Image: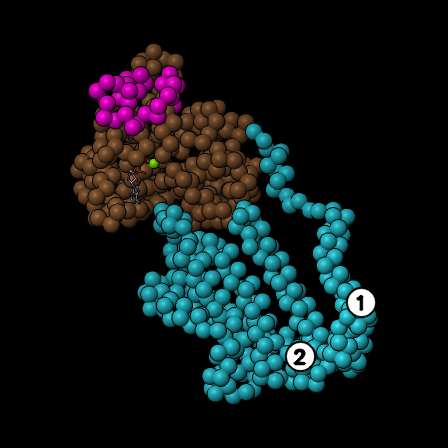
Amino acid sequence: MTFPMLQKSLHKRRGSAGAEIRRWLWKSILPASILAFWALATRFHWVDRKIWASPAQVWQATLGLNRDGFLWLALGESLLRDLAGFLLGAAAGLAAGGVLGWSPWAYRLGAPTLHFLKAIAIFAWIPLLTMVFGIGEASKIVFIALAAFYPAALNTLEGIRSVPKSQLELARAYRLDPWQRLRKVILPSALPSILTGVQVALILTWLATVGVEYFMSAGPSVGGILLNGAESFHLEIVFIGIILLGSVGFALNQGAHALGRRLLRHRPQTLKA
Amino acid sequence: MPWAGGFSAIDRKPLKPEVDIMTTKGILEIRNLGKAFPANGRKGSLQALDGINLSIRPGEFVSIVGGSGCGKSTLLRLISGLDDEFQGEISIGGAPVRGTSLDRGIVFQDLRLLPWLTAEANIALALENSGLSKADKRQAVAEHLKLVGLEKFAQAYPHQLSGGMSQRVAIARGLVNRPGLLLLDEPFGALDALTRSRLQAELERIWREEGITMILVTHDVEEAVFLGDRVIVMEPGPGRIRRELRIPLPRPRRRSDPRFLEIKEDILREFTGPETAEAESLEPAGRPLAEARLDWAA
Ligand SMILES: Nc1ncnc2c1ncn2[C@@H]1O[C@H](COP(=O)(O)OP(=O)(O)O)[C@@H](O)[C@H]1O
Ligand SMILES: [Mg+2]
């Protein structure tokens, strides 16, 4: 029997530092090329310089804008708002998806409505939200929460409903009570799907945050920077907003995937998110 | 080797409250059992089992052989109480079987190890409601990992185990809470010949020492004869009992014993004889029958 081989596979394999660096180089080829092309395009006036700012100008504007730490403040505002909406929406989504997945009654009652509501683009909620919650912070957070709610709810629901019959039967054979069944079988079985929901929710809430800040003009914030740059025709400011938006989105995505990999580290590769 | 110590060396406390043991001390009576599955939307159009009569006394070892699709797994499911929808009666000691019981263990044909639990935790799942203390649970799990020779793999996850190892984990999980009745659905199918005969011997020993009633479904006629007090031969369409043989050989049995071979040949003839023309689907074409192990994939 191949004991040593299997024992070895119990430990995680890790790439060497050299391989890690090579991977990073590969990843940065395209962004670096785009940056270079942008610099050349503005330097040699391939684009209208009255509209297009050069990378150097964007950098100058960034330093200028951040003189009193304004960018950090704006970023912090946006992240805090995102976090509040995410927590609210993801928690509600997990709960709703859990109940709908758990109880066939609740499913028959609630699932059609959920699917109908899901089909409404979330920006369509803004008029209603502003009418109910005003144009203050509450409206924005509820809007962001909505963005988190659907993926969290639907993936949780799906994950729970697709727990294999065979696993539920196993729970029955060992006479697990509902709580044991939930803890030992249903939640772990649904976990990959739930995590996917949370990951999607995390990405969508960030986009929703910046979007709602833009449309409902929040003060210092990433969306606010975009709005400001657009209204004053300062493309370098718009670029700052875009870069902030993209960087945070990228970081959230990476973080969510790392978390997913960690939580599912013992699953066969095919199950990993 | 892991099993050198064997199970007999282990001094164990009784695992279950008295009440549970009572339930399987009686005779398992199966009367006129039938099971129909709805097929193609028409209700009851697939008769998986029909007119099964079987009576198994406590502590008996019964082997069930038969081709794929003759309802062997269905029969075990009904006995285990996982499926309460059937015609006829199943009772133990006069009490009808309703729902599952920790005293009726089952080793599923498809194993059903939970992929997010280690081998150890998968086995421990069977003890979740055993009423044992944490320490006793841990000890019972360790003993059974040892029994199936996987103590080094306590922390391995199912996807890190070979098919045979997974099967051994499933067997350990079936045994760990010492059910009064253990249903085994082709438990040795994926094992190599050496491990299989070892585990067969080990299973026989546990059966002898613990007095557990065992019903073993297998497609290996030799295994059925080696282990069974009785061999039940089933046939499909609808699933029925075709024949029942008592195996009068003393234990431990020797596979080379002429009487053993004779009984084995006798059973094999059920699947090849001229009078079974209508059952030809049982036998995969071109398979050398000299090998007792018929690979009726189930
Ligand atoms: N859940 C089910 N739904 C419908 N048909 C089933 C189901 N389970 C088993 N059957 C059918 O019942 C018959 C017997 O199946 P099974 O008990 O698995 O046979 P075996 O274990 O002897 O191979 C087969 O024809 C199978 O297709
Ligand atoms: Mg079967």
At label 1, which amino acid type do we have? Leu
Give the image location of residue A272, x and y in percent: 55, 52
Q: Is residue B51 magenta?
A: no
Residue type at mark 2: give it.
Leu
Toward which corner of the image does residue B7 lie, by quadrant?
A: top left
Toward which corner of the image does residue B50 lie, by quadrant? top left
Q: Write down the residue under mark 1.
A: A40
The chain that hosts pointer 1 is A
Residue A26 or residue B110, whichever sits in front:
A26
Establish if A162 lies above or below A92.
Answer: above
Residue drawn at 50 percent across, 60 percent down: A194
Q: Residue B290 lies in magenta, yes or no?
A: yes
> Which chain is displayed in cyan in the rendered image?
A
Ligand 2: image quarter: top left
> What numbered label is drawn on residue A226?
2
Q: Where is residue A92 in the image (x, y as percent from the top left)?
A: 47, 71
In front of the other: B223 or B189: B189
Question: Chain in brown?
Answer: B
Label 2: few (<14), some (14–19) or many (≥20) C-alpha neighbours in 10 Å: many
In this rendering, is residue A42 above or below B90?
below
Q: Quadrant of the C terminus of chain B?
A: top left
Q: Where are the magenta residues, as a range?
A: B264-293
Disc 1 residue crowd, few under 14, some 14–19, many 20+, Cα 10 Å: some
Cα separation between marks 2 and 1: 24 Å
Q: Which residue is drawn at 52% across and 35% down?
A: B162
2 vs 1, front mark: 1
Tell me if I can see residue A77 in this picture.
no
SS at mark 1 in the image: helix
